[in-house]
Image (tube, rainbow, N blue to C red):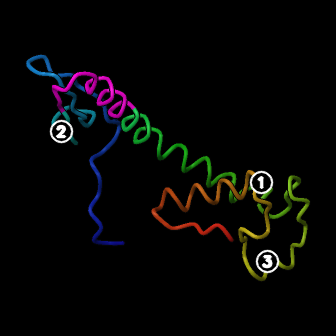
Amino acid sequence: MPNEPKHTPTPWHIRSYTNYKGFSIWEERGSKCVCERWDNLEGQQEINKANAEFIVRAVNSHQALLDACRQIANGPFSHDCPHCHKTDRYQVASEGIKFEHHKEDCPVRIAMTAIRLAEGKEVSADE
Protein backbone atom coordinates (compact mmCIF):
# COMPACT_ATOMS: atom_id res chain seq x y z
CA MET A 1 0.00 0.00 0.00
CA PRO A 2 1.49 3.34 -1.05
CA ASN A 3 0.26 5.39 1.94
CA GLU A 4 0.95 2.74 4.56
CA PRO A 5 3.08 4.15 7.40
CA LYS A 6 6.52 2.64 7.77
CA HIS A 7 7.75 1.21 11.04
CA THR A 8 10.75 2.56 12.88
CA PRO A 9 13.96 1.38 11.18
CA THR A 10 15.67 -1.71 12.55
CA PRO A 11 17.66 -2.98 14.32
CA TRP A 12 16.02 -2.27 17.64
CA HIS A 13 17.59 -2.71 21.07
CA ILE A 14 16.52 -2.68 24.71
CA ARG A 15 17.39 -0.09 27.32
CA SER A 16 16.88 -0.65 31.02
CA TYR A 17 15.90 2.27 33.21
CA THR A 18 18.05 3.08 36.22
CA ASN A 19 15.61 5.34 38.11
CA TYR A 20 12.65 2.91 38.04
CA LYS A 21 11.86 -0.65 37.04
CA GLY A 22 11.16 -0.90 33.36
CA PHE A 23 12.46 -1.28 29.84
CA SER A 24 12.21 0.57 26.58
CA ILE A 25 12.86 -0.46 23.00
CA TRP A 26 14.83 1.95 20.82
CA GLU A 27 15.87 2.15 17.18
CA GLU A 28 19.54 1.66 16.32
CA ARG A 29 20.70 5.27 16.63
CA GLY A 30 18.92 5.66 19.94
CA SER A 31 17.04 8.76 18.87
CA LYS A 32 13.55 7.19 18.74
CA CYS A 33 11.83 5.21 21.46
CA VAL A 34 9.62 2.55 19.88
CA CYS A 35 7.83 1.62 23.11
CA GLU A 36 8.36 1.36 26.83
CA ARG A 37 6.97 -0.65 29.69
CA TRP A 38 7.41 -0.38 33.43
CA ASP A 39 5.74 -2.06 36.34
CA ASN A 40 6.47 -2.24 40.04
CA LEU A 41 4.50 -5.41 40.65
CA GLU A 42 6.60 -8.22 42.10
CA GLY A 43 7.67 -10.65 39.38
CA GLN A 44 6.40 -8.44 36.56
CA GLN A 45 9.87 -7.09 35.72
CA GLU A 46 11.09 -10.51 34.53
CA ILE A 47 8.04 -10.93 32.31
CA ASN A 48 8.41 -7.42 30.88
CA LYS A 49 12.10 -8.00 30.15
CA ALA A 50 11.37 -11.37 28.49
CA ASN A 51 8.63 -9.75 26.37
CA ALA A 52 10.94 -6.90 25.33
CA GLU A 53 13.70 -9.35 24.40
CA PHE A 54 11.24 -11.44 22.39
CA ILE A 55 9.92 -8.36 20.53
CA VAL A 56 13.43 -7.18 19.67
CA ARG A 57 14.52 -10.65 18.45
CA ALA A 58 11.36 -10.99 16.33
CA VAL A 59 11.66 -7.53 14.79
CA ASN A 60 15.39 -7.76 14.12
CA SER A 61 15.12 -11.20 12.47
CA HIS A 62 11.85 -10.56 10.60
CA GLN A 63 13.27 -9.50 7.22
CA ALA A 64 15.95 -12.21 7.13
CA LEU A 65 13.40 -14.92 7.96
CA LEU A 66 10.94 -13.56 5.39
CA ASP A 67 13.68 -13.51 2.73
CA ALA A 68 14.64 -17.11 3.59
CA CYS A 69 11.01 -18.24 3.35
CA ARG A 70 10.67 -16.53 -0.04
CA GLN A 71 13.79 -18.35 -1.24
CA ILE A 72 12.24 -21.67 -0.21
CA ALA A 73 8.76 -20.86 -1.57
CA ASN A 74 10.08 -19.64 -4.93
CA GLY A 75 12.98 -22.06 -5.25
CA PRO A 76 13.32 -25.16 -7.42
CA PHE A 77 11.35 -27.35 -5.01
CA SER A 78 8.25 -25.19 -5.33
CA HIS A 79 7.64 -26.85 -8.73
CA ASP A 80 9.26 -30.27 -8.36
CA CYS A 81 9.07 -31.02 -4.68
CA PRO A 82 10.89 -34.16 -3.53
CA HIS A 83 9.00 -33.99 -0.24
CA CYS A 84 5.59 -34.08 -1.90
CA HIS A 85 6.59 -35.91 -5.09
CA LYS A 86 4.63 -33.25 -6.99
CA THR A 87 5.84 -33.00 -10.58
CA ASP A 88 2.75 -31.81 -12.46
CA ARG A 89 4.44 -28.87 -14.18
CA TYR A 90 1.39 -28.23 -16.41
CA GLN A 91 -0.93 -27.72 -13.44
CA VAL A 92 1.62 -25.50 -11.68
CA ALA A 93 2.27 -23.50 -14.88
CA SER A 94 -1.42 -22.94 -15.58
CA GLU A 95 -2.59 -22.29 -12.00
CA GLY A 96 0.52 -20.94 -10.32
CA ILE A 97 2.06 -22.39 -7.19
CA LYS A 98 -0.63 -23.13 -4.63
CA PHE A 99 -0.78 -24.60 -1.16
CA GLU A 100 -2.62 -27.67 -2.36
CA HIS A 101 0.39 -28.57 -4.51
CA HIS A 102 2.25 -29.36 -1.28
CA LYS A 103 1.55 -31.60 1.68
CA GLU A 104 0.83 -30.03 5.07
CA ASP A 105 4.27 -30.86 6.48
CA CYS A 106 6.13 -29.80 3.32
CA PRO A 107 8.84 -27.15 3.86
CA VAL A 108 7.62 -25.21 0.80
CA ARG A 109 4.07 -25.05 2.16
CA ILE A 110 5.34 -24.11 5.62
CA ALA A 111 7.41 -21.29 4.05
CA MET A 112 4.38 -20.10 2.04
CA THR A 113 2.30 -20.05 5.23
CA ALA A 114 4.98 -18.09 7.10
CA ILE A 115 5.14 -15.51 4.30
CA ARG A 116 1.39 -14.97 4.40
CA LEU A 117 1.41 -14.59 8.18
CA ALA A 118 4.37 -12.18 8.07
CA GLU A 119 2.52 -10.09 5.48
CA GLY A 120 -0.52 -9.92 7.77
CA LYS A 121 -2.66 -12.17 5.60
CA GLU A 122 -4.98 -14.84 6.93
CA VAL A 123 -4.29 -18.49 6.32
CA SER A 124 -7.19 -20.88 6.44
CA ALA A 125 -6.81 -24.46 7.64
CA ASP A 126 -8.05 -25.91 4.35
CA GLU A 127 -5.49 -24.15 2.15
Q: Dot 1: what SS?
A: loop
Relative vertical location of residue 52 with respect to residue 83 in this rendering, above or below = above
**Residue at point 47%, 39% (across, down):** 61
**Residue at point 11%, 21% (across, down):** 20
Question: Left or right of 59: which side holds 127?
Answer: right
Foreground: disc 1 or disc 3: 1
Q: Which quarter shows the C terminus?
A: bottom right
Q: Which residue is mark 3?
A: 93
Residue furthest to the bottom in view is 94
In the rendered image, residue 100, in percent from the top left (x then y), is placed at: 76, 70
In the rendered image, residue 51, in percent from the top left (x then y), is placed at: 35, 34
Dots 1, 3 in contact, CB < 8 A? no
Q: CA distance from mark 1 to mark 3?
A: 20 Å
Q: Which residue is mark 1?
A: 106
Q: Nearer the viewer, residue 15 or 52?
A: 52
- Mark before the other along the chain sequence, 2 or 1: 2
Question: Left or right of 66: which side holds 28?
Answer: left
> Which region shows up in magenta?
38-53
Q: Amino acid at mark 3?
A: Ala
Foreground: disc 2 or disc 1: 1
Q: Which residue is mark 2?
A: 33
Q: Amino acid at mark 1?
A: Cys
Please tell me whether residue 63 belongs to the stretch shown in magenta.
Answer: no
- Circle 3 crowding by C-alpha within 10 Å: few under 14, some 14–19, many from 20: few
- Mark before the other along the chain sequence, 2 or 3: 2
Q: Which quarter shows the N terminus?
A: bottom left
**Residue at point 78%, 83% (across, down):** 94
Q: CA distance from mark 2 to mark 1?
A: 40 Å
Magenta stretch secondary structure, dominant: helix
In the rendered image, residue 9, in percent from the top left (x then y), is placed at: 30, 45
Q: CA distance from mark 2 to mark 3?
A: 47 Å
